[in-house]
Image (cartoon, rainbow, N blue to C red):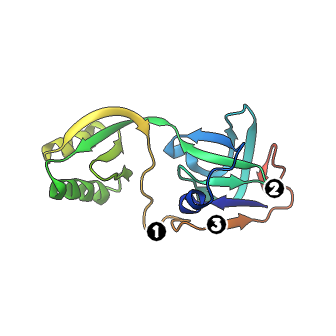
Amino acid sequence: MITIRHQSDANEVGVVDGASIAARPRDERHLRIKAIALSDGSKIFFDLPEAIVLSAGDEVVLDKGRVVLIKASEEQLICVAAKNTLNLIELAWHNGKRYFPTEIPMDHILVQRDHVIKTMLEGLGAIVVEVLSPFNPLRGAYSPHNANHTHGHDHSSAHEHERVGR
């Protein structure tokens, strides 16, 4: 059995000493059947009955209590600044209307580099700068496991050192 502690739960519990780290870009944190390399050089293999999406800060607790902390690795992004708060809200709305993955910190927006989106945002008055940064975009309202909660997957054939899942 594995347990996923999503970001809010992980923040409450704190990072377990000795946790292995899996630093992955956004697209590689969507898992069902996938091998993941860890910071200590080992690998775990996920073989889950349904896809899950992991965010930076999530913890995967394996069979024997081993903890894997999920981190967002650096990606090529554009940092979008606005003239004012209303303009920032408008820019976020335009990204959302296009279903473009977006991270919205307090005073700017982060999106993956895309020349079409960059041109659109600049046309709407945004100040756009290319950056290399971790990316943890918001999940859609209808995405699976959107709510932050702890849940387990009962799979008796899982071996934490090499395989996670069924």
Label 1 to label 3: alpha-carbon separation: 18 Å
Amino acid type of the residue that numbered disc 3 sits on in the rendered structure:
Thr
User: Residue 89: horizontal and vertical position, in percent?
Assistant: 22, 58
Q: Nearer the viewer, residue 94 or 161?
A: 161
The quarter of the image holding the N terminus is bottom right
**Quarter-wise, where is residue 7 in the image?**
bottom right
Question: Which residue is painted at 58% across and 61% down in the image?
Answer: 12
Q: Which residue is mark 3?
A: 150
- Looking at the image, do the residues carrying marks 2 and 3 touch, with CB atoms under 8 Å apart? no
| Callout 1: SS | loop
Question: Which residue is painted at 44% across and 35% down in the image?
Answer: 75
Q: Which residue is mark 2?
A: 63
Question: Which residue is painted at 72% across and 50% down in the image?
Answer: 67
* Circle on res. 142: 1
Label 2 to label 1: alpha-carbon separation: 29 Å
**Going from the N terminus, do you reach mark 2 or mark 3 first?**
2
| Callout 2: SS | loop
User: Residue 129: horizontal and vertical position, in percent?
Assistant: 26, 34
> Which of labels 2 and 1 is toward the front?
2
Mark 2 nearby-residue class (10 Å; few <14, some 14–19, many ≥20): some
Amino acid type of the residue that numbered disc 1 sits on in the rendered structure:
Tyr
User: Residue 17: horizontal and vertical position, in percent?
Assistant: 70, 45
User: Residue 140: horizontal and vertical position, in percent?
Assistant: 43, 62
